[in-house]
Amino acid sequence: MFLRKIMTALAVTVGLTFVVPALVVDSASAAAPTAVRTIYYDASGAQEFKADVDEGAAAWNKAVSVIELKPATGTQATIKVYADDGWPRTSSNGFGRGTIYMGRQAVKDGFYPPRIAAHEIAHALGLPDNRNGRCDYLMSGHSSPTSCKTTTPHETEAAQVTRNAGGLFPATLARPLEFKDCWVF
Ligand SMILES: [Zn+2]
């Protein structure tokens, strides 16, 4: 019964994709885990880090096929990125929703801005910090060396975001999750 439902859903999806692909993309947010969820981010306030934010977003788009982070301005954007002299930090309001600060303090300490951006974006995609000291994990933050310039998520991080996009992480949170000491020694 369940399998038949999935097969029917797949058939419908395939049919729609073939006939009207634009419609499928537009309705993706309410659809099955296999549908692409478009997430708009506004990096117009990220000042000198704008290109770094784009690079971080591109790394996630490459690693996770079910999401597409797209630049946008104004109310369309659910992720807003700013820059200031504090520490990089994120307030997460749900999957694909949050406010990010590209703090200059971590850049001053030598951390690589595109990696900082990819890390903070991950918080807005429902990933917590994971201070395991490994450069091949984005969420290791300050526990990885400043020489680490990896922006590609570890496969386990990509898999978690895929599950989050499929509904594991809530679309909205009653109270925002605050991640403030990602890059603080
Ligand atoms: Zn963090």
Image (cartoon, grey):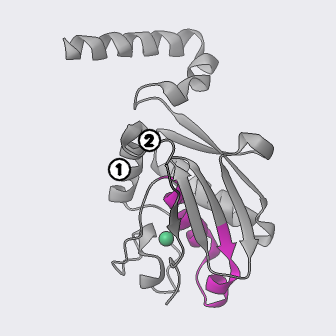
Residue 22 versus residue 47: which sits nearer the camera? Answer: 47
| Amino acid type of the residue that numbered disc 2 sits on in the rendered structure | Ala
Where does residue 35 sit, x and y in percent of width and height? Answer: 47, 29
Where does residue 141 sit, x and y in percent of width and height? Answer: 47, 76
Residue 102 versus residue 23: which sits nearer the camera? Answer: 102
| Amino acid type of the residue that numbered disc 1 sits on in the rendered structure | Ala
| Element on which disc 2 rests | helix
- Horizontal side, residue 43 vs residue 184: left or right: right
Could one spot residue 144 in this view of the protein?
no
Q: Which residues are magenta?
A: 101-125
In this rendering, the answer to whether 157 lies above or below 64 is below
In this rendering, the answer to whether 51 lies above or below 60 is below
Residue 106's quadrant in the figure? bottom right
Instruction: Name the dominant secondary structure of the magenta segment.
Output: helix
Could one spot residue 59 in this view of the protein?
yes
Give neighbour class at mark 2: few <14, some 14-19, many 20+ (Cα, 10 Å). Answer: many
**Which residue is disc 2 drawn over?**
165
Which residue lies at the image location 64% right of the left edge and 59% below the top edge? Answer: 99
| Element on which disc 1 rests | helix
In this rendering, the answer to whether 138 lies above or below 160 is below
Disc assigned to residue 159: 1
Magenta segment includes 119: yes
Magenta segment includes 153: no
Closer to the eye: label 2 or 1: 2
Residue 19's quadrant in the figure? top right
Circle nearer the N terminus (2, 1): 1
Where does residue 103 sit, x and y in percent of width and height? Answer: 67, 77
